[in-house]
Amino acid sequence: MTEQLKEIELKAKEELSHAADLKSLDDIRVRFLGKKGEITAILKQMGKLSPEERPVIGQLANKVRADIEQAVTSAQNAIKSKAAAVKLEAERLDVTLPGKAPKLGNAHPLNATLAEVEEVFLGMGFDIVEGPEVETDHYCFEALNMPKHHPARDTQDTFYINENVLLRTQTSGVQIRTMEKMKPPIRIISPGRVYRSDAVDATHSPLFHQIEGLVIDKGITMADLKGTLEMLLKRLYGEDTQLRFRPHHFPYTEPSAEVDLMCFNCHGKGCSMCKQEGYVELLGSGMVHPKVLEGCGIDPEVYSGFAFGIGLERITMGRYNINDMRLLYENDMRFLEQF
Protein backbone atom coordinates (compact mmCIF):
# COMPACT_ATOMS: atom_id res chain seq x y z
CA MET A 1 0.00 0.00 0.00
CA THR A 2 2.98 2.26 0.63
CA GLU A 3 4.16 1.65 -2.90
CA GLN A 4 0.70 2.37 -4.25
CA LEU A 5 0.59 5.77 -2.51
CA LYS A 6 4.02 6.72 -3.83
CA GLU A 7 2.99 5.70 -7.36
CA ILE A 8 -0.21 7.78 -7.05
CA GLU A 9 1.83 10.85 -6.01
CA LEU A 10 4.28 10.47 -8.90
CA LYS A 11 1.47 9.90 -11.40
CA ALA A 12 -0.53 12.91 -10.15
CA LYS A 13 2.46 15.26 -10.32
CA GLU A 14 3.33 14.01 -13.79
CA GLU A 15 -0.19 14.70 -15.10
CA LEU A 16 -0.34 18.05 -13.35
CA SER A 17 2.83 19.17 -15.09
CA HIS A 18 1.15 18.62 -18.46
CA ALA A 19 -2.24 20.20 -17.63
CA ALA A 20 -3.03 22.83 -20.30
CA ASP A 21 -5.95 24.66 -18.66
CA LEU A 22 -7.91 24.98 -15.45
CA LYS A 23 -10.55 22.46 -16.52
CA SER A 24 -7.95 19.75 -17.13
CA LEU A 25 -6.36 20.63 -13.80
CA ASP A 26 -9.65 20.24 -11.98
CA ASP A 27 -10.29 16.87 -13.64
CA ILE A 28 -6.91 15.62 -12.35
CA ARG A 29 -7.62 16.94 -8.86
CA VAL A 30 -10.98 15.12 -8.72
CA ARG A 31 -9.49 11.87 -10.02
CA PHE A 32 -6.84 11.77 -7.33
CA LEU A 33 -8.30 13.71 -4.39
CA GLY A 34 -12.07 13.49 -4.89
CA LYS A 35 -14.52 11.38 -2.85
CA LYS A 36 -14.16 8.63 -5.41
CA GLY A 37 -10.50 9.39 -6.12
CA GLU A 38 -7.53 7.08 -5.97
CA ILE A 39 -6.31 8.18 -2.51
CA THR A 40 -9.81 7.72 -1.10
CA ALA A 41 -9.86 4.19 -2.55
CA ILE A 42 -6.58 3.41 -0.72
CA LEU A 43 -7.92 4.77 2.57
CA LYS A 44 -11.00 2.55 2.32
CA GLN A 45 -8.67 -0.46 2.54
CA MET A 46 -7.21 0.66 5.87
CA GLY A 47 -9.46 -1.82 7.70
CA LYS A 48 -7.43 -4.71 6.28
CA LEU A 49 -4.22 -3.47 7.89
CA SER A 50 -2.83 -4.43 11.26
CA PRO A 51 -3.03 -1.92 14.12
CA GLU A 52 0.68 -1.26 13.78
CA GLU A 53 0.47 -0.48 10.02
CA ARG A 54 -2.57 1.80 10.12
CA PRO A 55 -0.91 4.93 11.62
CA VAL A 56 2.06 4.57 9.26
CA ILE A 57 -0.11 4.27 6.15
CA GLY A 58 -2.52 7.00 7.39
CA GLN A 59 0.37 9.43 7.93
CA LEU A 60 1.81 8.65 4.50
CA ALA A 61 -1.62 9.04 2.85
CA ASN A 62 -2.07 12.47 4.44
CA LYS A 63 1.38 13.55 3.29
CA VAL A 64 0.70 12.37 -0.28
CA ARG A 65 -2.67 14.20 -0.27
CA ALA A 66 -1.01 17.42 0.97
CA ASP A 67 1.77 17.15 -1.63
CA ILE A 68 -0.75 16.66 -4.45
CA GLU A 69 -2.89 19.58 -3.21
CA GLN A 70 0.20 21.79 -3.16
CA ALA A 71 1.07 20.65 -6.69
CA VAL A 72 -2.48 21.47 -7.84
CA THR A 73 -2.24 24.96 -6.34
CA SER A 74 1.13 25.59 -8.00
CA ALA A 75 -0.20 24.40 -11.36
CA GLN A 76 -3.28 26.64 -10.99
CA ASN A 77 -1.11 29.69 -10.30
CA ALA A 78 1.11 28.90 -13.27
CA ILE A 79 -1.84 28.54 -15.66
CA LYS A 80 -3.48 31.79 -14.40
CA SER A 81 -0.20 33.70 -14.72
CA LYS A 82 0.28 32.43 -18.26
CA ALA A 83 -3.30 33.40 -19.21
CA ALA A 84 -2.86 36.87 -17.71
CA ALA A 85 0.37 37.37 -19.64
CA VAL A 86 -1.33 36.36 -22.91
CA LYS A 87 -4.23 38.72 -22.22
CA LEU A 88 -1.94 41.62 -21.38
CA GLU A 89 0.02 41.07 -24.55
CA ALA A 90 -3.16 41.01 -26.62
CA GLU A 91 -4.43 44.21 -24.99
CA ARG A 92 -1.13 46.02 -25.06
CA LEU A 93 -1.42 49.68 -26.11
CA ASP A 94 1.22 51.79 -27.71
CA VAL A 95 1.13 54.83 -25.44
CA THR A 96 3.33 56.75 -27.85
CA LEU A 97 0.55 56.89 -30.48
CA PRO A 98 -1.41 60.16 -30.70
CA GLY A 99 -4.72 60.11 -28.85
CA LYS A 100 -8.14 60.18 -30.48
CA ALA A 101 -10.12 63.23 -29.44
CA PRO A 102 -13.76 62.44 -28.66
CA LYS A 103 -16.24 63.88 -31.14
CA LEU A 104 -18.40 66.41 -29.37
CA GLY A 105 -21.85 67.37 -30.60
CA ASN A 106 -23.36 70.84 -30.86
CA ALA A 107 -26.76 72.15 -29.89
CA HIS A 108 -29.34 71.88 -32.66
CA PRO A 109 -30.13 75.31 -34.16
CA LEU A 110 -33.69 75.15 -32.79
CA ASN A 111 -32.48 74.32 -29.27
CA ALA A 112 -29.77 76.97 -29.43
CA THR A 113 -32.26 79.66 -30.48
CA LEU A 114 -34.80 78.59 -27.85
CA ALA A 115 -32.11 78.79 -25.15
CA GLU A 116 -31.31 82.36 -26.24
CA VAL A 117 -34.99 83.34 -26.21
CA GLU A 118 -35.52 81.84 -22.77
CA GLU A 119 -32.44 83.64 -21.45
CA VAL A 120 -33.80 86.98 -22.66
CA PHE A 121 -37.19 86.47 -21.03
CA LEU A 122 -35.78 85.08 -17.79
CA GLY A 123 -33.71 88.25 -17.61
CA MET A 124 -36.93 90.28 -17.87
CA GLY A 125 -38.55 88.38 -15.00
CA PHE A 126 -40.66 85.93 -17.00
CA ASP A 127 -41.38 82.34 -15.99
CA ILE A 128 -41.25 79.44 -18.45
CA VAL A 129 -44.42 77.32 -18.40
CA GLU A 130 -45.24 74.19 -20.38
CA GLY A 131 -48.50 72.40 -21.05
CA PRO A 132 -49.99 69.32 -22.75
CA GLU A 133 -49.58 68.81 -26.49
CA VAL A 134 -52.84 66.84 -26.60
CA GLU A 135 -55.33 69.56 -25.69
CA THR A 136 -59.08 70.02 -25.34
CA ASP A 137 -61.17 72.17 -27.64
CA HIS A 138 -61.95 74.44 -24.71
CA TYR A 139 -58.36 75.44 -23.99
CA CYS A 140 -57.23 75.56 -27.60
CA PHE A 141 -60.17 77.52 -29.00
CA GLU A 142 -63.24 78.31 -26.91
CA ALA A 143 -61.43 79.95 -23.98
CA LEU A 144 -59.59 82.09 -26.55
CA ASN A 145 -62.84 83.64 -27.80
CA MET A 146 -63.16 81.17 -30.68
CA PRO A 147 -66.40 79.22 -30.14
CA LYS A 148 -67.38 76.33 -32.37
CA HIS A 149 -67.92 77.29 -36.03
CA HIS A 150 -65.86 80.46 -35.56
CA PRO A 151 -64.29 81.25 -38.98
CA ALA A 152 -60.81 81.65 -37.43
CA ARG A 153 -60.79 77.90 -36.78
CA ASP A 154 -60.75 77.23 -40.51
CA THR A 155 -57.23 78.66 -40.78
CA GLN A 156 -55.86 76.32 -38.12
CA ASP A 157 -56.05 73.02 -40.12
CA THR A 158 -56.41 71.08 -36.90
CA PHE A 159 -55.65 67.42 -36.17
CA TYR A 160 -58.71 66.27 -34.21
CA ILE A 161 -58.61 63.08 -32.15
CA ASN A 162 -62.33 63.33 -31.44
CA GLU A 163 -64.84 66.17 -31.29
CA ASN A 164 -63.34 67.70 -28.13
CA VAL A 165 -59.72 66.46 -28.11
CA LEU A 166 -57.03 67.58 -30.54
CA LEU A 167 -53.34 68.13 -31.09
CA ARG A 168 -52.81 71.74 -30.09
CA THR A 169 -52.40 74.22 -32.93
CA GLN A 170 -50.81 76.81 -30.64
CA THR A 171 -49.46 76.99 -27.10
CA SER A 172 -52.14 79.54 -26.14
CA GLY A 173 -53.86 76.88 -24.04
CA VAL A 174 -50.96 77.15 -21.60
CA GLN A 175 -51.80 80.85 -21.14
CA ILE A 176 -55.42 80.01 -20.30
CA ARG A 177 -54.38 77.33 -17.83
CA THR A 178 -51.95 79.74 -16.20
CA MET A 179 -54.53 82.53 -15.86
CA GLU A 180 -56.97 80.07 -14.28
CA LYS A 181 -54.39 78.98 -11.67
CA MET A 182 -52.52 82.24 -10.96
CA LYS A 183 -53.54 85.71 -9.96
CA PRO A 184 -51.92 88.73 -11.64
CA PRO A 185 -49.21 89.86 -12.02
CA ILE A 186 -48.42 87.16 -14.60
CA ARG A 187 -45.34 87.09 -16.83
CA ILE A 188 -44.78 83.87 -18.71
CA ILE A 189 -43.61 82.38 -21.98
CA SER A 190 -44.85 78.98 -23.13
CA PRO A 191 -42.60 77.26 -25.68
CA GLY A 192 -43.47 73.90 -27.19
CA ARG A 193 -44.42 71.77 -30.16
CA VAL A 194 -47.65 72.46 -32.04
CA TYR A 195 -49.38 70.66 -34.90
CA ARG A 196 -51.27 71.77 -38.00
CA SER A 197 -52.31 69.89 -41.09
CA ASP A 198 -49.95 71.74 -43.42
CA ALA A 199 -48.21 70.35 -46.48
CA VAL A 200 -44.43 70.19 -46.09
CA ASP A 201 -42.53 72.85 -48.02
CA ALA A 202 -39.74 75.37 -47.46
CA THR A 203 -41.79 77.36 -44.93
CA HIS A 204 -44.42 74.91 -43.60
CA SER A 205 -44.50 71.68 -41.62
CA PRO A 206 -47.26 69.72 -39.83
CA LEU A 207 -45.09 69.87 -36.71
CA PHE A 208 -43.33 73.04 -35.63
CA HIS A 209 -42.47 74.96 -32.47
CA GLN A 210 -44.11 78.04 -31.05
CA ILE A 211 -43.21 80.44 -28.26
CA GLU A 212 -46.07 82.41 -26.80
CA GLY A 213 -45.78 85.17 -24.24
CA LEU A 214 -48.30 86.58 -21.79
CA VAL A 215 -48.17 89.52 -19.39
CA ILE A 216 -51.12 90.45 -17.16
CA ASP A 217 -50.90 93.31 -14.66
CA LYS A 218 -52.31 96.71 -13.89
CA GLY A 219 -51.59 99.42 -16.46
CA ILE A 220 -50.14 97.19 -19.21
CA THR A 221 -50.27 98.87 -22.64
CA MET A 222 -49.18 98.32 -26.25
CA ALA A 223 -46.02 100.24 -25.38
CA ASP A 224 -45.03 97.42 -23.02
CA LEU A 225 -45.64 94.89 -25.79
CA LYS A 226 -43.57 96.90 -28.27
CA GLY A 227 -40.69 97.33 -25.82
CA THR A 228 -40.66 93.62 -24.91
CA LEU A 229 -40.55 92.47 -28.53
CA GLU A 230 -37.87 95.00 -29.43
CA MET A 231 -35.74 93.79 -26.53
CA LEU A 232 -36.08 90.18 -27.71
CA LEU A 233 -35.43 90.75 -31.40
CA LYS A 234 -32.53 93.14 -30.91
CA ARG A 235 -30.87 90.57 -28.66
CA LEU A 236 -31.35 87.96 -31.37
CA TYR A 237 -30.57 89.97 -34.49
CA GLY A 238 -28.57 92.98 -33.35
CA GLU A 239 -29.19 96.55 -32.22
CA ASP A 240 -29.92 97.77 -35.76
CA THR A 241 -32.99 95.49 -35.98
CA GLN A 242 -36.12 97.30 -37.13
CA LEU A 243 -39.70 96.17 -36.52
CA ARG A 244 -42.94 97.12 -38.20
CA PHE A 245 -46.33 96.81 -36.50
CA ARG A 246 -49.35 96.34 -38.78
CA PRO A 247 -53.00 96.36 -37.60
CA HIS A 248 -54.53 92.91 -37.73
CA HIS A 249 -57.34 90.87 -36.18
CA PHE A 250 -57.09 87.95 -33.77
CA PRO A 251 -60.13 86.75 -31.80
CA TYR A 252 -58.18 86.63 -28.54
CA THR A 253 -56.53 90.09 -28.66
CA GLU A 254 -57.93 93.59 -29.14
CA PRO A 255 -56.28 95.63 -30.56
CA SER A 256 -54.12 93.17 -32.53
CA ALA A 257 -51.00 93.60 -34.62
CA GLU A 258 -48.78 91.62 -36.94
CA VAL A 259 -45.11 92.29 -36.31
CA ASP A 260 -42.69 92.29 -39.25
CA LEU A 261 -38.92 92.17 -39.15
CA MET A 262 -36.81 94.06 -41.64
CA CYS A 263 -35.49 91.49 -44.13
CA PHE A 264 -32.06 90.32 -43.00
CA ASN A 265 -31.17 89.53 -46.62
CA CYS A 266 -31.82 92.90 -48.28
CA HIS A 267 -32.17 95.19 -45.23
CA GLY A 268 -35.47 96.66 -46.36
CA LYS A 269 -34.67 97.15 -50.05
CA GLY A 270 -36.79 94.25 -51.30
CA CYS A 271 -35.65 90.84 -52.54
CA SER A 272 -36.99 87.40 -53.44
CA MET A 273 -36.76 86.23 -49.82
CA CYS A 274 -39.10 88.94 -48.56
CA LYS A 275 -41.12 88.98 -51.80
CA GLN A 276 -39.94 92.53 -52.51
CA GLU A 277 -41.60 93.80 -49.31
CA GLY A 278 -38.41 94.67 -47.45
CA TYR A 279 -39.94 93.12 -44.32
CA VAL A 280 -40.67 89.52 -43.28
CA GLU A 281 -43.81 88.64 -41.31
CA LEU A 282 -42.62 87.33 -37.95
CA LEU A 283 -45.33 87.08 -35.31
CA GLY A 284 -48.80 87.99 -34.14
CA SER A 285 -49.51 90.01 -31.02
CA GLY A 286 -51.97 92.29 -29.25
CA MET A 287 -53.69 93.23 -26.03
CA VAL A 288 -55.52 90.33 -24.37
CA HIS A 289 -59.22 90.48 -25.21
CA PRO A 290 -61.45 91.38 -22.23
CA LYS A 291 -63.58 88.27 -22.87
CA VAL A 292 -60.52 86.07 -22.47
CA LEU A 293 -59.67 87.75 -19.16
CA GLU A 294 -63.24 87.42 -17.89
CA GLY A 295 -63.33 83.74 -18.85
CA CYS A 296 -60.29 83.14 -16.64
CA GLY A 297 -61.71 85.05 -13.68
CA ILE A 298 -59.63 88.21 -14.18
CA ASP A 299 -61.39 91.58 -14.04
CA PRO A 300 -60.63 93.48 -17.28
CA GLU A 301 -61.58 96.74 -15.57
CA VAL A 302 -58.63 96.29 -13.19
CA TYR A 303 -56.09 94.35 -15.22
CA SER A 304 -54.87 94.45 -18.78
CA GLY A 305 -52.24 92.47 -20.60
CA PHE A 306 -50.55 91.61 -23.85
CA ALA A 307 -49.85 88.35 -25.62
CA PHE A 308 -47.80 87.28 -28.61
CA GLY A 309 -46.94 84.11 -30.48
CA ILE A 310 -43.78 83.55 -32.48
CA GLY A 311 -42.60 80.55 -34.47
CA LEU A 312 -39.28 79.16 -33.26
CA GLU A 313 -38.42 77.87 -36.74
CA ARG A 314 -39.00 81.29 -38.28
CA ILE A 315 -36.69 83.16 -35.92
CA THR A 316 -34.11 80.35 -36.17
CA MET A 317 -34.09 80.64 -39.95
CA GLY A 318 -33.54 84.38 -39.65
CA ARG A 319 -30.92 83.92 -36.96
CA TYR A 320 -28.79 81.56 -39.08
CA ASN A 321 -29.76 82.63 -42.63
CA ILE A 322 -31.50 79.33 -43.35
CA ASN A 323 -33.80 79.49 -46.37
CA ASP A 324 -35.56 76.10 -46.11
CA MET A 325 -37.39 74.96 -42.99
CA ARG A 326 -37.03 71.28 -43.94
CA LEU A 327 -33.29 71.42 -43.25
CA LEU A 328 -34.06 71.73 -39.54
CA TYR A 329 -35.76 68.31 -39.46
CA GLU A 330 -33.82 66.09 -41.85
CA ASN A 331 -30.93 65.31 -39.46
CA ASP A 332 -28.38 65.78 -42.22
CA MET A 333 -25.02 66.00 -40.43
CA ARG A 334 -23.54 68.00 -43.31
CA PHE A 335 -26.04 70.72 -42.43
CA LEU A 336 -26.01 70.40 -38.63
CA GLU A 337 -22.21 70.37 -38.31
CA GLN A 338 -22.15 73.98 -39.51
CA PHE A 339 -23.62 75.19 -36.21
Image (cartoon, rainbow, N blue to C red):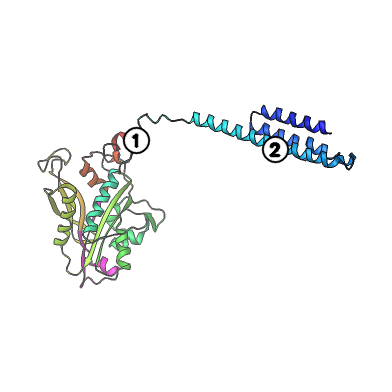
Distance of label 1 from label 2 (alpha carbons):
51 Å
Specify the amino acid type for callout 2. Glu
Indicate the position of residue 81 as horizontal and vertical percent values. 57, 33
Indicate the position of residue 246 as horizontal and vertical percent values. 14, 53
Label placed on residue 268 = none
Q: Quadrant of residue 302?
A: bottom left
Q: Which residue is mark 1?
A: 101
Query: Callout 1: 10 Å neighbours few (<14), some, many (20+)?
Result: few
The quadrant of the rendering that contains the N terminus is top right
- Residue 263 painted magenta: no
Indicate the position of residue 332 as horizontal and vertical percent values. 33, 35
Q: Is residue 319 above or below residue 153?
A: above
Q: Nearer the viewer, residue 314 or 166?
A: 314
Discs 1/2, front: 2
At 34% from the left edge and 54% from the top edge, which residue is drawn? 168
Q: Which residue is mark 2?
A: 69
Q: Nearer the viewer, residue 129 or 212?
A: 129
Q: Nearer the viewer, residue 256 or 207?
A: 207
Indicate the position of residue 262 as horizontal and vertical percent values. 13, 46
Q: Which residues are magenta?
A: 286-311
Specify the amino acid type for callout 1. Ala
Q: Quadrant of residue 31?
A: top right
Using residue 43 as the reference point, say whether residue 141 is left or right of it: left
Look at the numbered discs 1 and 2 and tell me whether their residues touch, using CB distance below 8 Å.
no
**In terms of secondary structure, where does tag 1 sit?**
loop
At 21% from the left edge and 44% from the top edge, which residue is drawn? 319
Q: Of the residues under marks 1 and 2, which one precedes in the sequence?
A: 2
The quadrant of the rendering that contains the C terminus is top left
